[in-house]
Amino acid sequence: QFPGGDVEMMKYIGRNLRYPSSDLSELIDNGRINVRFVVRKTGKIDNITMRTPLAKAFEAEVVRFMQNMPKWIPGKMNGENVDCYYTLPILIHFQIK
């Protein structure tokens, strides 16, 4: 899990995810994107993939954003840290003027 839980993760997303400066209307509709990744047993995020197709500029930003996340609290099995897949839904809202 993200350090501090879901509330802290939502704060982190709100403060750190930046929309590309290109024409946002080309990116995606308002809605949800799903990002799948592995939380390694060290807490590091790895193997970031988009489960929802995005424009290349926004995909690059999501990968940048995910790679800069603090280490997560890894999953455990039989008392030992293990690698785990995680899918993170992110709600996107654009205001196009």
Image (tube, rainbow, N blue to C red):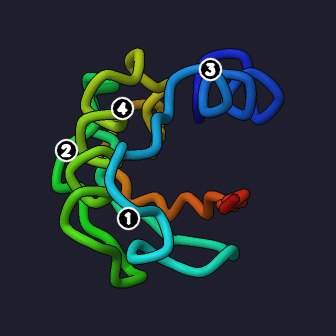
Measured Cα–Cα span from mark 4 to mark 1: 19 Å
Question: Where is residue 64 shown, x and y percent of the image?
Answer: 24, 36
Measured Cα–Cα span from mark 2 to mark 3: 21 Å
Q: Which residue is mark 3?
A: 15
Q: Which residue is mark 1?
A: 36
Residue at 43% of width from left, 32% of height from top? 74
Where on the picture, by quarter, is residue 65? top left
Q: Residue furthest front?
A: 97
Question: Where is residue 14 shown, x and y percent of the image?
Answer: 67, 30
Residue at 25% of width from left, 66% of height from top? 49
- Tell me whether circle 2 and circle 1 mark residues in contact (CB < 8 Å): no
- Tell me whether circle 4 and circle 1 mark residues in contact (CB < 8 Å): no
Residue at 34% of width from left, 37% of height from top? 66
Measured Cα–Cα span from mark 4 to mark 2: 15 Å
Q: Which residue is mark 4?
A: 81
Q: Could you tell which of marks 2 and 1 lies nearer the N-terminus?
A: 1
Q: Could you tell which of marks 2 and 3 lies nearer the N-terminus?
A: 3
Which amino acid, mark 4? Asn
Q: Could you tell which of marks 3 and 4 lies nearer the N-terminus?
A: 3
Question: Where is residue 16 shown, x and y percent of the image?
Answer: 51, 23
- How packed mark 4 is, by other alpha carbons closer than 10 Å (few <14, some 14-19, many 20 or more), is some
